[in-house]
Every structure is written in structure tokens, then in C-alpha cells.
Amino acid sequence: MKLLTNVRKLLLLQQSPKQRLITTARTITKISQPHDEAEPALTSSELDELERNCEMRHHKNNIPLIRQLVQALHSTGQTGQDQEQTRRQLEEQLELLPNATHPRLLGYDNQPLELANYKHRVLPEQGVAKEFSDLARALNLYRMDHLGNYTGHKSYYLTGQLAMMEQAIIQYALQSITRQGFKLISVPDILPRNIIEACGMRTEGERTQVYKLDTGECLSGTSEMALAGFFAQRQLAEQELPVKVAAVSRCYRAETSGLHEEKGIYRVHQFTKVEMFAIATPEQSEQILEQFKNTEIALFKQLGINFRLLDMPPCELGAPAYQKYDIEAWMPGRQMWGEISSCSNCTDYQAKRLQIKYRRDSDGSLAYAHTINGTATAIPRLLIALIESYQGAGNGNGNDSIQIPEVLVPFMNGQRTITKNKKVPEIKLVKFIKST
Amino acid sequence: MLKLGGVLRKSFFLKRYISALYITGDKANEHYVTIQPFLDFAGTFRDRAALDHSISSRGLNINLETVLSKYKNYQTHHEQLLRLEKERDSITKQLKLLTKSGGSSEQLNALRENGKVLRNDAKELKQKLYPIEDDFIHEFLHLPNSLHSQCPASDVEKLIYMHKPTASRSSTSHLERKDLVHFVNNNCYYLMEQAAHFDVRVMQSLANYFVTRGDFVQTSNPDFVRCVLLEANATPLTHYYLVQEEHLQNKLNTAYLTGCGSFESFLGAMTKLSVYPSVLPMRFVACGRSYNREEALLYGPTPSLYTATQTNAVQSFVATQTADEADTELERVLNLAVDFYKSLDVPFRIVYTPAVSLTASESLRASIEVYAPSLKRYVCLGRISNFGDYVSKRILFSARREKHFDFLHLVGGPVLYTTRLIAALIELGVELPLGTLPGAQAAEPSVEAMTQHQRDLQEFKDLFK
């Protein structure tokens, strides 16, 4: 716990540029007044803790450089201009640091901890179970071939009942989470770069997951960014918290994968997602994360798939999360666990960068709020899990019909089975038709 | 500065000398050919008067005389090349025969020499033909579709349906409703509460209405469309944002963010597709985002939900075998849309858009418009167009009859833009309905309609599910 407190203290440094300047300036004063007990100086041991946190989370932050810069700020030899430059460099480095880590996760040794395993169906076994793309193609409900030159790499079409199921899942998720008090917000998918970076995603570099447009703006990878951006620069009253909101949005990810197990629509560049997001006080945030986790579990339980709940280790948290749960569904066609949902508590990491604050009831002071985010339903992988899990449940005569989960039936015009689509033509492509 | 950037971008696109849709042989090494459009010279030039009428009614700066003279020049060279190729073929055949029958070496050498000369001539002619071909084909691809007889040739739209005449009352802007709309700029807005629910629900309901009442097949489409398809559809490239891709293999065929609820997004699945006539007419409907950044600027200069780039949309797409069937299908789509909008009981109308406002691929456009009190004008909620077989020829979308290919007639377009409808409904003082929408699938009473007590009770019940 001591480690956590110390790391949290260090996070004072990770604030908005304006705020950071003030804090960093105070830090310099602290450094020059080492005996001030009220505001202890940034010590070497605190830097050691910072380094351990980065190492544990597999972040390649340049701690030696941070040490150097802190030391340079100590030295009396620097002129005002040099100090300013050093301070700016230090700020840039601090910006890249990850959030603190929940002490519960410190002993996880790079492995997630399975907290629960839910079995709702007897699934077809290996060798019998078919994979999503084979099932969907046989039913004429999906196309992913020969599209690269026209609609881009890894683009896909869903047709007929599969396209209806996408909308049914959205309606089902919205109905469930609005009952839990989440307020729906329609969000923008095109966002300025700084909002995306403030949420902990890099927009530059070789392996960035963020698409950029010709205007310099970016495409949102998850509506968590737009929702966090909505609350940027806001000051909320403590009694308003927690604020729980949700959004249905299109998510864009530039990442690619050549892995065999991620083929088909498992990892795609565009998909629809229903997202949950909350702003809470530091006292509330852990409890809200538990609520998010329980909401997700309830959603997937009712869909009747087999899944497990994982508590993620430090190295899987990314930069902004303080703790994170993942839900993985068993995909019998692929014979693997696939992540279909997750939820994270980002504590004040995003709030500091976006200036999301609340006024305390007790003393009227302003404090940074905490942000929590979680996936209600992300379409492509959930479709894989559902179609692969419910395969072969038709009339038993060996056809490929697929049963529709009971909770989705009301959103599918009462249909209970997915059958072969005969209205959509089989794919027959021509290469060339001779011109006149 | 921004304005200058826009002008430069526009002029770049207008003067895009290289097309992703048609790449001549000399550039084929550098640029990958993704499709070879069917170039219907005979069909296009058959009715010159109609083509002239289409060009002048649309106000296009195209001199048909010049295009025709370029065609003649192209044809002459092309025919010459074909002759040479034919001669080369015949020499090859003669050579084969002579070799088999043991012809003399003099005869063989003479033929070989002749073949070499012909090969060099053909090579030379091809080099000469490339710039001629480039120049002509690109002008040919800019020629517009012929106009439908119903399309107004003047610059005034033609009213074909009106529901509830507008009271001339003006109203405050929807942006005043801060509880429902948080508008930042054309790329960034948030809808809250009932507006957010309506945004999703109206889109899903209308799509389902088309499925259940119109025998449409629902689809879920991609959001990026490459340049080659935008060119095939004669969509101005300035309408959409260019997506920067890290590893772009074909630099000419860049990706644009159209949204999965755009018409162009359907074209990827239809490119090079050959179907049996038995599946026709094919009727598809998709719902999702649309990101058109220019079309909405008509409703400026004040930015609002009427001018926003992003919206949810319901998009229709129909393919038929004949022009008559296309007319019937267009009417059918409009009837479905009319029935849906009538249930909202708001002032709306349908007009045929004048030729001057059409894109080159459209032969007719019916625009569904709702009255926007704050703008004191009608704004477009959707537009169903007849594309004839213009686009199909470019993307090779056909029906096969024995050895013959019929290019399909396309009808389609958005039947709903949710942002503009929400803005107008707010201004008209109409409550945003949810469960009562035609096509809505309300499984249970909506949460919004529940009292707090009912909501708490439901939450408690859900715990035990």
C-alpha cells in the first residue's frame, strides 16, 4: 500500500501542461528545500518505485533520462532558459508514464488470474465445431473475400439475419444498460488528436492504432475517448457523481494482424460497439468498476455463451488503467478463448489530462475525478462467439442452421433460427467484360 | 488559410490527371489495375442529342465536339493497332504452318523479319496511343449519364409529394435545447437523453421497416471506400475525408471515410459481381454512419445539426434488370419512405432535384425533405437516385444470360439522415417518439417510458436473471 501511495504522490507530476508547470515549479522548490516536511521532495527512492512500476507494466519509459532531468533541475549551474528547456523535457517524459498499478496485481507475474468461469452450453467439440467464417459463408450471410481493392483490407459485409443480429445485439445491450442507470449519448467518431492522446493512445509512430484523416483529425478507436472528451474541462458537483453514460459508436483501429487465430472478423479495422463510461469520485471508482464487471457478466450470461472472467496483470493494463478485468468467450470453432469485453478503472489518469474535476462536498475544494470504462458489447467477436456456440442447434438434419439466443429473439422480429439466405446471390466474380 | 487549403485541395481533385478507375498500359507497372471498366462508346454516343441535353442541363463545362474528335483520333489509332496485331497473329500462324511443312529458310526468315517490323510498329504505335488514350478515356469517363425524362432540366425542383403544408412560423434553433444537443462544430456534436435514443432507434426502425414491409435484405457494410469506387460512382472526392494509411500499396487507390451507411459502401460487394437474373430485383438496406463533409454545407453558414458531417443513416440499394423495373423500384422505395415519415406527422415533401444539382452518375434524384423552421426552408433527409446502368458498367456488375452480360440498373441512396430529422423535430416541437415508430421492435416498455419506481423494480429483477 505504501508503494501505491508513493506512486500516487508522484502522479501529481502528470497533469495538464499549465497545471504541470505549477506542480513542477513547486517540485523544484521542494527539491531546493529538502527539509520541508510538509511537502517532501522527489527522492531517489520514489524514482525507483516509478521505475519498478514501468518495468512491471512492460513500459519502455526512459527513467534514466527522467533521473538526469530531475538532477539537472537540482543543479544550480543552469540558467533560466536551460531550466525551462529541462522542465519541458521532463514534462514530456512524465506524460508518457503509465498510471499507477493496483497493489492486488503486484504478485500476478505477467499472468492473468481467472476469477470465474461460466458454462451455459454444451458446446460442439473440436473437429465437429465449425468456425464462424465457414458457418456464415455456408449460410450466405457474410463476405470478406476480394474486397481489399474496393473497401479496404479486412473489410467485411454482413447480410440478412447476421446484419439484423448486429442491430439486435445493440438493442439488447442498450435495453440492459439503460436499466442500470446509464444515460445514452450519441458521440462523434472524428476527434482531435489531443483528446485521443489524453486518453492514453499514441497517435504517432510506426505501430499506432489510430487512423488519421487528411485534416489532421483522428478516428476514434472507442467511444470512451469521445465520452471522456465530453467531460473535458468540466467541474461536477460531488452529489452528481457517479455519472454513468453509454454510447453506440463505430470504432476504427489501424492495427493489423497476420495471426491465423485472428483471421476473419476477429480483428478488424472497423466495428460497432456499445460502450459504458463513468465519472466517479476516488472513493467510488473501485465499486463502480465492480458494477461494470457485473453488468458485463449479466449481459453475457443471458446470451448463454461460455466465458471466463480474468483479472489482468500489470503488463496487460496499457498506459491509463489502474486495474482491468477482461471477459473471454470460448469460441468452439476456433478452439480458443477470445476477448469479447473488458472494463478498466483509469483513476485520475485521463481526468488529469482532460481536466475533469469535481467539487468536494466536505470542503468545497476541487479534485480530479476518476474515470471508468467498459465494453457492453463489441459486435464482431460477440458474433463469432454466438454463431460458433449456437451452431448445429437447428433441426438436427445436419444443416448449418443456427439458433438465436432467447434474449435476442424479440429484436429479430421473433425469429428463432438463422437459416441459409437465398435472396443474396452466390459470389461469382468476373475479371473482365469486353468493351464495345 | 483554411479556405486557401480547401481551394487547393479542390483544384487538385479536379485536375486529377491520373484516374484509379482507368490506368493505361504504360502506367500499369507503377499502378496496380484494380478494375477494367466496361467502356460503352457506342451506347454513349448513340443518342448525341440526349447526351448534349444532359451536359447542358447539368451545366457541365464539357465540349462534346472536342470529346468526339478525340474519340475519332483514338478510334483511328486503336483500329490501326488492332490491324497490326491481326497481321502479327497471321504471321505467327504462317510461321507455325511453314515450320511444320518444312518451308525454306528464306521464306521463314522473310516472315520473321516481317514479324519483327510489325512488332516494332505495334510497339511504336502503342507508345503513341497511350497519351491519346489517356486524354480521351478520361474525358469519356467524365461524360454524364443521360437524364431521366422526369428530371427537371431547369434549375427549379419539381414537387411530387407534400405532407402537411408548412406554417410560415419560425422557431428558435434546435441548438438552444442544450439538454438534448451539445454542438461543438460540424465534426463534433453530442446528442443526449431522448435525442440519443431516437438517433439509434429511428435508424433501426426504418431499416427494419424496409425489411419487413419492403422485402429488403439488411446488410452491414464497410466504412472505407477506395477511390476507384468513388470515381466509378462519380462522387466528388471532396465529399469525404481521405484516410491516411500506413502501408498503402496502391498510392492511386486511396481510402475515403464514407461510413457504412453510405451508398458507395454497397458498391464494394457488387464490384465484378455477376448474378443470375432469378435473384433480381435485389433489394438491400443498411444502417450506420455517413460522413459527408460537403453535402450538408448547403444549410450553412451557421453550423448546426443540419450541417454536421457525421450522421446515422439508413441507406437503400436496389438492382434491377431493366430501366422500367428501376422506375418501379424507385417509386417503391419512395412509397415506403412516405409511409414512414407520415407516421411522424411532420411537414415534409418529395421533389425531383434539378439536373444542375445531380452528380454525373445520377439520371434522376428524388429528394425527401423536411421543413426546418429555424432555416425557414426544407432540408434533405434522404435522396433516392436512379443511376441507370452507368455505375454498373464501371464496376462490372451484371446479370448473366447465357453468354451475354446485362449491366444492372441501380436505384438507391439514403432514406434517412438522423441528425437533420432530430434537429427539425425539435424545432417543430414534435416529441421524439421511440416505441411507436413503424418497424420498431419494442420488446418491453422502453426504459425511458418507465417511472423511477418501475425502473428500480426492473433493476432489482435483473439482478436475478
Image: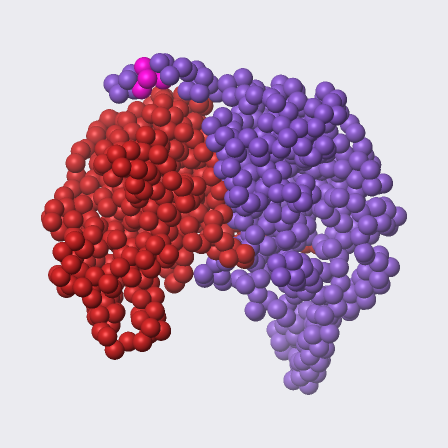
Chain colours: A red, B purple
Q: Which quarter shows the C terminus of chain B?
A: top left
* Magenta region includes residue B457: yes
- Position of residue B445 relative to residue B335, above or below, is above
**How would you classify the magenta stretch by its main secondary structure?**
helix
- Position of residue A223 relative to residue A30, above or below, is above
| Image position of A167 (left or right of A385) | right
* Magenta region includes residue A23: no
Q: Nearer the viewer, residue A130 or A5?
A: A5
Q: Residue at x 48, y 35 (%)?
A: A186
Q: Residue at x 65, y 61 (%)?
A: B4
- Position of residue A86 relative to residue B294, above or below, is below
Q: Nearer the viewer, residue A103 or B123?
A: A103
Q: Residue at x 64, y 47 (%)?
A: B294
Q: Position of residue B353 (x, y in %)?
A: 76, 37
- Position of residue B287 relative to residue A196, above or below, is above
Q: Residue at x 54, y 57 (%)?
A: A214
Q: Position of residue A57 (x, y in %)?
A: 21, 54
Q: Which quarter shows the N terminus of chain B?
A: bottom right
Q: Position of residue A268 (x, y in %)?
A: 41, 47
| Image position of A156 (left or right of B9) | left
For the view shown, which residue lies furthest in the bottom direction?
B106
How many marks can you see? 0
Whether residue B180 is visible here, answered yes or no, is yes
Instruction: State which region is magenta.
Output: B455-459
Whether residue B326 is visible here, answered yes or no, is no
